[in-house]
Amino acid sequence: LQATGARVNATLRWRVRRADGAESHTFVGPDDRVELAFESVRAYYAIELVELVDGAAPRTAASANVVCKHVRREIRTLTDADRGAYLRALEVFHAVGDAEGAARYGPSFRNARYFAALHNAKDYCYHNNLVFLTAHPAFNLQVEEMLELISPGLARCYWDFMVDHQYGGAWATASPMY
């Protein structure tokens, strides 16, 4: 968060409060910039910046309501630490059984075998028809939610397969993704 135009010798008081009251942060000092890692994705926050100057009434310089959102990054742009955490969570997602997963991560947990069975169901084909356009993003969202249960705060990523267009028909063997 960055403030501009503060009066000379001003002290700035930043307040960041989650709408449900579960989280609150206050920063006071001369710095016109503060950094905060939001703890709850999909939560709403109220931010207030008050300027304090000796001998003058406090002035609310700015206030806003914001929501903390996931930002997806192309997998090749993740830091080594974020990519490692993502791959470790993916490994757990593939290795853990249903009962163990539910015990560790809660009753809504489903592992990779569940999604593979759903995707490959003989009763319904998720390919070669218009449901492909909606079903696969829904699967991806559900898998992301499972990875978030395994590793809260996990960096969300995607694979931009068009980056691999340069490899032509050899993309499956030439791309660094494989």
Image: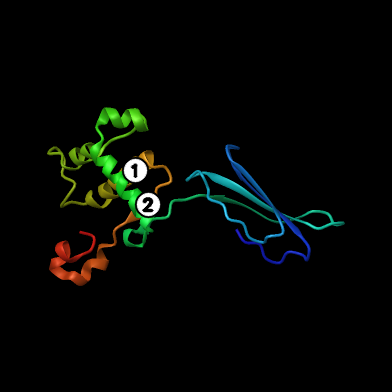
Instruction: Name the one closer to the observer, 42 or 167.
Output: 167
Where residue 144 sits in the image (x, y, percent)? 34, 45
Q: Residue 166: give x, y in percent of width and height.
A: 21, 72
Question: Which residue is drawn at the image coordinates 21% and 38% (left, top)?
Answer: 113
Q: Is residue 115 above or below residue 172?
A: above
Residue 35, picture quadrant: bottom right
Q: What residue sits right under mark 2 in the picture?
A: 156
- Is residue 138 visible in the rendered structure shown here? no
The tally of labels here is: 2
Image height of 24 relative to 158, above or below:
above
- Which amino acid, by three-letter code, is at mark 1? Leu
SS for dot 2:
loop
Q: Report the Cα–Cα distance between label 2 and label 1.
A: 9 Å
Describe the colour scheme in one phrase: rainbow
Q: Secondary structure at mark 1?
A: helix
Residue sitting nearer the eye, 100 or 16: 100
Closer to the chain start, of discs 2 and 1, is: 1
Q: Residue at x 83, y 54 (%)?
A: 57
Asked where in the image residue 79 lies, by quadrant, the reply is: bottom left
Residue 81: name its quadrant. bottom left
> Disc 1 marks which residue?
147
